[in-house]
Image (cartoon, rainbow, N blue to C red):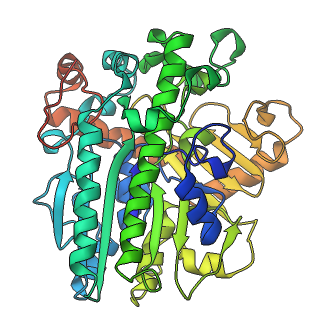
Amino acid sequence: MIVMSDEHSGLALSSGGHPWIKTPFMDDFGANNTKFASAYTNSPICIPARASFTTGLYAHESRNWDNALPYNGTPKGWTHALRDHGIDVTSIGKLHYRSETEDTGFTRQILPMHVVNGVGDLLGAVRDPLPVRHKSRSMADEVGIGESNYTRYDRNIAAASIDWIKDHSDQDNWVLFSSFVAPHFPLIAPEQFASLYHLEDIPLPKLSRAADRHDHPWIDSLRKCFIHDQFFDDQRRREALLSYGALCSFMDDHFRQICHTIETCGLADEALVIYTSDHGDNMGSRGLWGKSTLYEEAARIPMLMRAPGSTSPKVVNTHVSLVDVAPTILEWMGLPIPASLPGKSLLSVASQPDDLDRAVFSEYHAAGAETGAYMVRQGKWKLIYYVKMEPELFDLDNDPEELNNLAQDGNHDNIVARLTMELKGIVDPEAQDAIAKADQRALLDEHGGREAVIARGGFGATPAPGAKAQFR
């Protein structure tokens, strides 16, 4: 059983040290089972992240660069492997693949969400130079307390997941993937969960004031593309954060309901349960909203696991990422793990002593990226490598807020060199940046060219099933 949320930062858990966001069930689940303290997305945007989750490969290997190059079933993933061995693999909720008709390995899809018109966010493929995404304004406009198409959709996903578990509790050999949208924007949260918070208790996010920031040039370009923060004042920032926190609590409650159903159906002693998210959210830090950066807020994700008979309650400090989920599921279901997969089974990671030298990798080639951006996390060090720009280096033990870029001081050149070598053992950054941009230019040409795509505009988030995308 895999439960995935959308845009739930690994920092947005009370057990992860967040000072005011409330995730009580996830906290208890992690404390009583296995919590991976340092988990990362392999790309901080939906389609590349979900492709990595499904295939067990990095985005540059599958060439799912952005939200207009959706996964279409090639290369095959863990879903295909299980189904082809007679195991029922059912999805409920958001997939964000090309369409329901593609063979993505699922036995069936229930309430699926896929990309708009089988194409997705073409505007996100426009780079060199970047466009201004005017739809960004909706991030500030669509904030408040109430219900949205997304919250209603998530309630339906939870209900369908619960019914599925009850209906199949006496059957063997099945895997259920329940995929929710919360806490993804629009930041509109149900009253039941918004009432857990008080606006006056919510601090402003770090570096929310422009005068306090010294943007890296890559971030400066991103900010000029995604103009979200132009429409926020301090009151709106607090309201948006309240809604984000409430949506995290909303997601926490859905996870609680699913786990409760597993227990009441007598499956708690045999069912593998994983909770994770596709990527995080900047939460207003540095005046940035949504995802699309390799800073901790957007790159870190939750990773919680219950593996009866395989692991005991513990906090695992080995760094892990989404590509580790595929080998985990294959191992649990008794299938071989292909040697070509870069990840490692979380079951194996959790059963061994912490490996503080293990490196994890993330990359970004999508909306707002002037050039390719890559991340390597190893030990306490984190390198962000930008093609044709200076890198950033952070000591996350001593600077968890990533306020001090050590790549600038000249005293850490050996660390930068070592992590750059680690990175280049995974990918050729410049070559892959060129390939990504070539694929994106070809895609734009298929749809009338750059100017036609810009004139059409962007639509923000993919609408829930039954709703229409609103372009601006």
Give the x, y percent position of residue 381: 76, 50
Residue 266 shows up from this direction: yes
Q: Is residue 132 left or right of residue 446?
A: right
Nearer to the camera, 313 or 418: 313
Would you place residue 348 above or below residue 405 in this image?
below
Q: Please tell me which residue is depicted at 22% across the width and 68% down the height of the picture.
A: 163
The residue at the far right in this view is: 411
Would you place residue 369 above or below residue 340 in this image?
above
Q: Please tell me which residue is depicted at 15% across the width and 36% down the height of the picture.
A: 446
Give the x, y percent position of residue 266: 38, 83
Please identify the quadrant where the N terminus is shown: bottom left
Please identify the quadrant where the C terminus is shown: top left
Q: Quadrant of residue 365?
A: top left
Q: Please tell me which residue is depicted at 53% across the width and 36% down the height of the picture.
A: 293
Residue 302 shows up from this direction: no
Give the x, y percent position of residue 461: 29, 33
Total labels: the figure holds 0
Q: Please tell me which residue is depicted at 56% across the width and 60% down the height of the picture.
A: 426
Would you place residue 319 above or below residue 198 in this image?
below
Q: Is residue 126 left or right of residue 232?
A: left
Give the x, y percent position of residue 269: 47, 85
Nearer to the camera, 417 or 399: 399
Q: Is residue 468 left or right of residue 9?
A: left
